[in-house]
Amino acid sequence: MSGNTFGALFRLTTFGESHGPALGGVVDGCPPGIALSEAVIQQELDRRRPGQGGPTATARQEPDAVRLLSGVFEGATTGTPIGFLIENQDQRSRDYSAIMDVYRPGHADRTFDAKFGRRDYRGGGRSSARETVSRVAGGAIAQELLRGLGVNVSAATVELGGIAANARDFGGADHPELARPFFSADAEVVAAWEERVCAVKAQGDTLGGIVEIRAAGVPAGLGEPVFDKLDARLAYALMGVGAVKAVEIGAGIQAARLTGSQNNDPMTPEGFLSNNAGGILGGIASGQELIVRAVVKPIPSIARAQQTVNRQGQATTITVGGRHDICAIPRIVPVLKAMVLLTLADFVLLQRRLGR
């Protein structure tokens, strides 16, 4: 297993490193006749592009301009593999030369050495968050497939630095032209988040948060009742993003604090009266809105001295330089949305294959 391909029928394979010449991918299994252009993909890429996100943002500036290489003709997919390329243009590998033999706490440096016996120390190579640009491009293609089926996926930040949002205005958070800071689900909390970010940045530290992804219009019946449960595959997809440490579906961890009578979603002839299940029952979509949350850890690259060891096992300290985000939010929000899109596109094709 190489671990570079996601999906069974709608498959995304990604390639490239943070400081290599380019990143890219191939989407295989996309049906023909779906309208697609570079501009459509670029709109999603622009939402995760480095150098934006206010006080949380890295100083790295990348246009993330996508080039479609195959699989599209006269503005529509052909049914053949869709290849795309995104060139790196603002690498500064010299920022990492001082730590080539030192393991950064919270990073995959030591585990890469354990697995491969060598590592690309320039920004983490394949383990870098830069790799997710290819996932967003693949998710943009999946979004066009799902759009034609009436499925709409949106994502918003619901907590940052321990401060929770009260509202759930996904329209305002995820609208491509409104650009609410942090993709916040609550306009009223933005000022508090900005103050928190600036205070932590001044201390040379970083922050985490929680992102909620919702999918409306998901047809009932998607998913399988045993190993390929829809909620299991969604959790797998989101946990495959490097900074994610936990995933909740519906009521999530709160369900453990409820009684059965409180947690069950009563049904009437008109539909469900609540959605603690998050739109999934027995691993299969119920037709309700899917509700998924991903818990995002703080960025591990901090401008504070930390204890660590070098490749020889000797104790040392490290202060990570370079250009880094203070928080993975807001740039991780389009990535998590993309992973849900890819999962749903795959399940749609699996359902079609079964003739259902």
Image (cartoon, grey):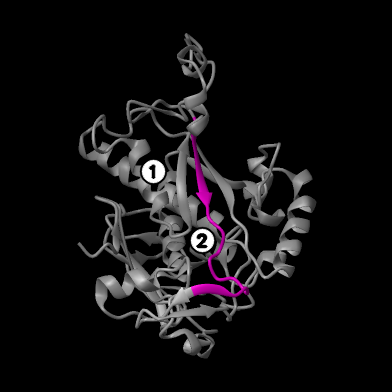
Looking at the rendered structure, which numbered label has been put on residue 21?
Answer: none
Above or below, comparing residue 69 to residue 31 in the picture: below
Give the crowd class for mark 1: few <14, some 14-19, many >=20 residues within 10 Å: many
Which residue is identified by label 2? 40
Q: Which amino acid does label 1 sit on?
A: Leu
Q: What residue type is labelled 2?
A: Val
Q: Give the range drawn in magenta.
A: 289-307
Viewer-nearest of discs 1 and 2? 1
Q: Can residue 353 be seen in this view?
A: yes
For the N terminus, which image quadrant?
bottom left
For the C terminus, which image quadrant?
top left
Q: Can residue 344 be seen in this view?
A: no
Residue sitting at 31 percent across and 41 percent down?
347
Q: In the image, residue 166 lies at what x, y percent?
A: 71, 37
Task: Tell me if residue 294 is in the magenta stretch.
Answer: yes
Which residue is identified by label 1? 234
Above or below, comparing residue 125 to residue 291 in the picture: below
